[in-house]
Image (cartoon, helix red, strand yellow):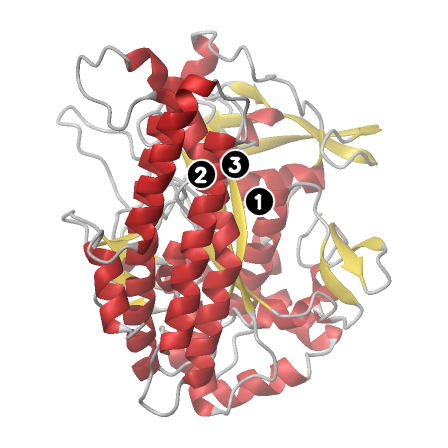
Amino acid sequence: MNLVHDAWLPFRLQDGSEKVLPITAICNSEVVDFALPRADFQGAAYQFAIGLLQTVFAPKDKNQWWEYFSTPPSTEMLQDALNRVEHAFNTTGDGPLFMQDLDALEDAPTKSVSALLIESPGENTCSENRDHFVKRSESAVMSLEMAVMALFTLQLQPPTNRGCKGGRKGLRGLGPLTTIILSDNDSDSLWKSLWLNVMSRDFVQHQPIDDFNNIFPWLKKTADSRPDAKKNFNQLYPNDAHPLHVYWGMPCRVRLINESIQTNCDISGREKENVVRECKIKPYGNSYSAEWRHWLSPYQDVVSDDGLQPVRTFLNELNYSYWCNFVFVDDVGKTKCAETVSHYYSLIRRRSGLNHKPRLWVFGYEIDKKKSAKVNGWFSHEMPIFSLQNKEQGKICDIVRDMIDLTKDMWQYTEKIISYVLYGVQDKKKGDKKEYLYPKLLKNVSSFNAEFWHRSECHFYAVVQQVVESTAGSDVYLTPENAKYWLSSLRRICMDLFDEYALSESVEVRSMEKRMKARLALDKYLSAPGSSNKINDFVFNYQI
């Protein structure tokens, strides 16, 4: 099977039906989305298609970008471009195989193909019999198509120790977030969403492609990263490969064992003739240095010698407070949106803007950094992108930062009051006699924390929309009316959540007085002047 010639990817069509087609179907106006059976595979399919287009079909300049955005290429034109790399996208046969080690890995242990799934237990977990709640053979048989997609998904964001001790992290480290720009309308063709993430060659300004071996690492021998006696090991730096290598990082050394038998795929449920039940996995593959910058990920400045680092996935923390991190370059907050998002802004500077408002799809796995084989969960969320010039973005970020500071101040106090009423504790202190309450406390705090951010999200974007629409030239401002709307929305949500969590359950009469006093204290804090510096500053600065 060749991934740039054969029909292997499931797509969703305009009429709602699904069909397996070649990758060239992305330029068909009837195709509106991929239709992979797993959320992480869906995200990987977007990255696969975007990487292919950026590698073999990137427009030379912004004029050509707009030309192909309006009128997609023909299937024949796209196929001609893909033919340049067909030798790198075989999945069976002799020679290099897609995302598989060039060596046959005959001396490597044989593992179940389920080891390719990111949520599968790691090597240490299995060897120590700590995988009681994870089925080791949950997907013991995969079609060749789904096995390839599982392998590509793993190479994009592998937990370390995947299938063997000595596994390497991905090009973006552990648990990176990916951001992909989507067209605003679900009925738009898939091509529009993919093309919004393809950058013109004059924007990225990388050197011409003269050797595909420097882009696709499976075309050459893997550099063994086994540490020596002094624990030094080989690392791959950005200067060692072509910039397009970021789309095709390969930290895991894997070989699929293909079998020709007719059986059902445990992932797709479809009956297939070519399946994979086992694979070879070997440690110490390509080890990527921290200097790599993936074009589909946002970065932030952390206290580290490595400088900018990819924004990691944290299930209970990622909310609209990170919106500026994902959609702008924020010099004050020391964050940088994905390079593809910066390219989008360069496009709208050239023209009056797109005739629709795209969305930003943010997704990734949260992987425990201390237990690097443990996957805590999958995160996926969509956020709006507004058409703004660079000079306007910094001022918008200043306003949003004020809004977020106010939000965190009001919610942290509300959270503390609710915790006090329910459990009689406000802050965990060493030796606290009520320490037994904290596991339950933390679980419930996480619950109403998520509820708060969810309820306030629509109000946040409504205010930001008003700020964007009120922008005139270099003037960016939050009107007193909108500032008051934001403040009152937060107050109402905080009080509502207190009532729901602290007063809605059956309450003993003797504890009701305590709860009502707590409610009065909360209402006073959220409303009275002088109760909070953040509230006072917001009221004063925006003339409420």
3D distance between C-alphas at marks 3 and 2: 5 Å
Q: Is residue 92 left or right of residue 236?
A: right
Q: Secondary structure at mark 3?
A: helix
3D distance between C-alphas at marks 3 and 1: 57 Å
Which residue is labeled 2 in the image?
A: 498
Q: Is residue 169 left or right of residue 65?
A: left
Circles 3 and 2 in contact, beta carbons < 8 Å:
yes
Q: Is residue 382 above or below residue 480?
A: above
Q: Is residue 154 left or right of residue 533?
A: right
Where is residue 2 drawn, in percent x and y? 68, 52
Which residue is labeled 3 in the image?
A: 500
- Which image quadrant for residue 123? top left
Q: Amino acid at mark 1?
A: Leu
Q: Residue at x 57, y 86 (%)?
A: 66
The residue lying furthest to the top in this view is 129
Between marks 3 and 1 in the image, the one whose residue lies nearer the viewer: 3
Closer to the camera in the image, 378 or 513:
513
Q: Amino acid at mark 2?
A: Phe
Q: Amino acid at mark 3?
A: Glu
Q: Secondary structure at mark 1?
A: loop
Q: Residue at x 52, y 33 (%)?
A: 118
